[in-house]
Image (spheres, rainbow, N blue to C red):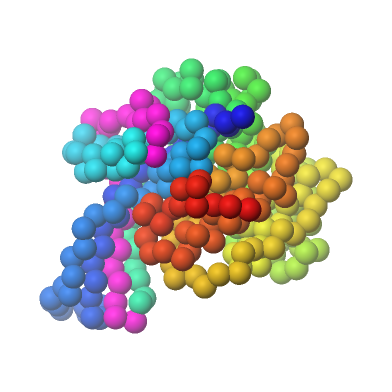
Amino acid sequence: MTNKVVILGSTNVDQFLTVERYAKPGETLHVEEAQKSYGGGKGANQAIATARMKADTTFISKVGNDGLAQFMFEDFKAAGMNIDYILESETEKTGQAFITVDAQGQNTIYVYGGANMAMTPDDVKSAKAAIVDADFIVAQLEVPVPAIIEAFKVARAAGVTTVLNPAPAKEIPQELLELIDVIVPNEFEAEILSGVPVTDEKSMAQNADYFLSLGAKVVIITLGEQGTYYAVENDSGLVPAQKVKAIDTTAAGDTFIGAFVSRFNMKERNLVEAIDFANKAASLTVQKSGAQASIPLAEEVQL
């Protein structure tokens, strides 16, 4: 059975500059390469990953009416997702990330939230029909928390499983924490929320207990090359990562989320199987450069 998944999140256009070195204050330098724009944003990345894994995917997002994101819509359609709920802001520009990379591979990133930060609870209400018809709704923290709370309230009332990827890492209100069924932080995000550094399996269990005590039914902590820790009531474990040579880890976490929700069954609790699939998908992502371009198709992911 194909999971129906709604992704609520950000759409960014990533702008890259390649330089020999960074300019000093007041200095002008020539740019080695002005690369073309690429699709980005954690919401868009996760939506593409979910759709490429053959889940029935709907994306709720907000862009400007400046046309900057139009090239991304073709990729969204090619992945097979429903984009009827990508809204246009009349006042804010499309979100962008400005990324500069020097000859040593060091980068600086400036993010302009733009239309992403104009997402409102009323915008979410306009997509209620899609949310109540889903099996899962997934959100990250690149859109305003009140919009996420509204989406999760609608989902909770309809019996739809709520999934939060608390990234980028920051404290979130108790009201949202109590609406989460499945939480998927990495080790750094888990520490920020729980106050407990993730250093070993004991501290992983302490983190999981914190989230379970708030009402989460499933806790998944991604640990990069160390694998993935999971916990539910009366069961926990560590699923090893795939052994590969990473070239670029961009969008690996987003790929994991999309692949996981495409395969997880909340009733059957097929956690290890879904995590194995997600780990494999993420391992393919890190072997390619870029964000959305590196996210694999379902046919490439084999257990």
Between 73 and 277, the residue placed more toward the observer is 277
Q: Tally the numbered discs.
A: 0
Give the vertical position of 29 relative to 58 (above or below): below
Residue displayed at 66% across by 51% down = 275
Q: Where is residue 97 in the image (x, y as percent from the top left)?
A: 31, 55
In the rendered image, the quadrant that contains the N terminus is top right
Q: In which quarter of the image is residue 43?
A: top left
111 or 256, which lies in front?
A: 256
Q: Residue at x 71, y 69 (%)?
A: 199
Residue 101 magenta-highlighted: yes
Q: Where is residue 269 in the image (x, y as percent from the top left)?
A: 75, 39
Along the viewing direction, whichever of 233 and 290 lies nearer the viewer: 290
Figure quadrant of residue 116: top left
Magenta stretch: includes residue 240: no
- Position above or below: 255 against 224: above
Residue 138: give x, y in percent of width and height. 54, 38
Looking at the image, residue 84 sits to the left or right of residue 5; the answer is left
In this view, the residue farthest toward the right is 234
Q: Residue 126: x, y in percent?
A: 42, 20
The stretch in magenta equals 79-104
Give above or below for 54 relative to 125.
below
**Could you tell me which residue is drawn at 78 percent across and 44 percent down?**
232
Q: Can residue 213 be seen in this view?
A: yes
On the rendered structure, is 223 left or right of 82? right
Question: Residue 6, can we see it?
Answer: no
Looking at the image, which residue is at 40% across and 29% down? 82
